[in-house]
Image: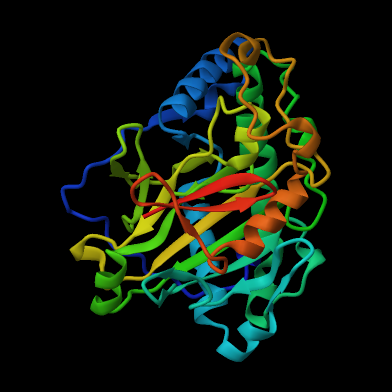
Amino acid sequence: MSVAALPPVPHYNAAPPTKADLDYADLATIDLSKMESAQGRARLASQVRDALLTHGFFYAINHGYSQSQGNRMFDIADVPFSCVGDEEKRSYSDIDQETGWYQAYKLRQYWHIDAGVRDQLEYINIDRNVHKQGHPEALRPFLPEIEEFARFNHGNVLFAILRLIALSLELPEDALVKIHNCNGLGEAFVRFIKYHPRSAEDEQKTKNVWLKGHTDSGSITILWSQPVAALQILGKDNKWRWVKHVENALVVNAGDAMDFLTGGYYKGTIHRVVQPPPDQQQHTRLGVFYFTMTDGDVKLVPFYGSPVLQRVGINPRCENNVAPTMLEWRRERANGYGRTELRPSREKGVEEEVINGVVVRHYN
């Protein structure tokens, strides 16, 4: 598709990067341009292993998508929020109880955050096969670009990361790629999220937390870095640290499925969203994500054949005979989040819910 053929899109004015002195997490940077040689992949696999064991998050750079392409995708990401009315949003906001899939909006004030305060974020899910769902009228001219963006994330980024993770486990390089065909609805999708500022009263009631500390339900999450500081990760020292914006970088993290598949070796990373620093608090925060899961029928049991896992010891989250499939896990996580009653944990500031016999923790 030539540049001249692209439909016009309103420009989204992002906030300037914050000047606040924040305690940033020291995340590794993985240079995907070094994937071409076996030697380069071996070095990157070692770096990915260390990054996932240390923070569970890392940056990916030199991924092959230009800054101008990324800027346009952020412009497109704002369309379903700024150019679509509330009534049309509601017509695309049902949730499929069988799959846990939003068709396609999650509207504001749907989730309970804390102390009677409901969320102020809205998002839209777009399956990587854009023809599997309906779309608001304003977004339809951009569907070819969104589908191409999904293909890029899946083939150029996700598969590269999965190959590196497989190598880090001393598995065949395509071991994880093989279970990420993602042909079912909601197994891999683009998500655009827009966070809106909240009242001072709501900030006080929730201690400035916009989204409680949690893990993602899938295998790998790809976040396209944007300037509003709000994302924090929980370190092994139980301190929350900010994730710094890096221009045209990807922020990558592991989720629950990776935890299941590696027997707790690569744990789902605990992260949250909080109120931005003062110089960004009057701005909306627009996020562009690519969420991935294994194929829905994959049973979430460890790769027992991994020599690495055999050496370090495998600690499955549940017995193999009761392990959920990916579809079962994401359905329960999606249907319960923000709507089920959480119980206090023995850990301070932690609440729990039980899904398929597995304890899921939420961190305040």
Q: Is residue 208 left or right of residue 321?
A: left
Q: Is residue 136 left or right of residue 178?
A: left
- Give x and y (percent) for residue 138: 63, 80
Q: Residue at x 75, y 68 (%)?
A: 97
How many discs appear? Answer: 0
Using the image as rendered, state which of residue 123 and residue 160 is in the foreground. Answer: 123
Q: Is residue 45 left or right of residue 272?
A: right
Q: Quadrant of the N terminus?
A: bottom right
Q: Residue at x 73, y 18 (%)?
A: 304
Residue 114 placement: quadrant:
bottom left
- Give x and y (percent) for residue 231: 37, 52
Q: Quadrant of the C terminus?
A: bottom left
Q: Residue at x 45, y 26 (%)?
A: 51
Q: Residue at x 64, y 74 (%)?
A: 139
Relative to 131, residue 178 above or below: above
Q: Is residue 234 visible?
A: yes
Relative to 159, residue 103 above or below: below
Q: Is residue 226 visible?
A: no
Using the image as rendered, state which of residue 345 and residue 77 is in the foreground. Answer: 345
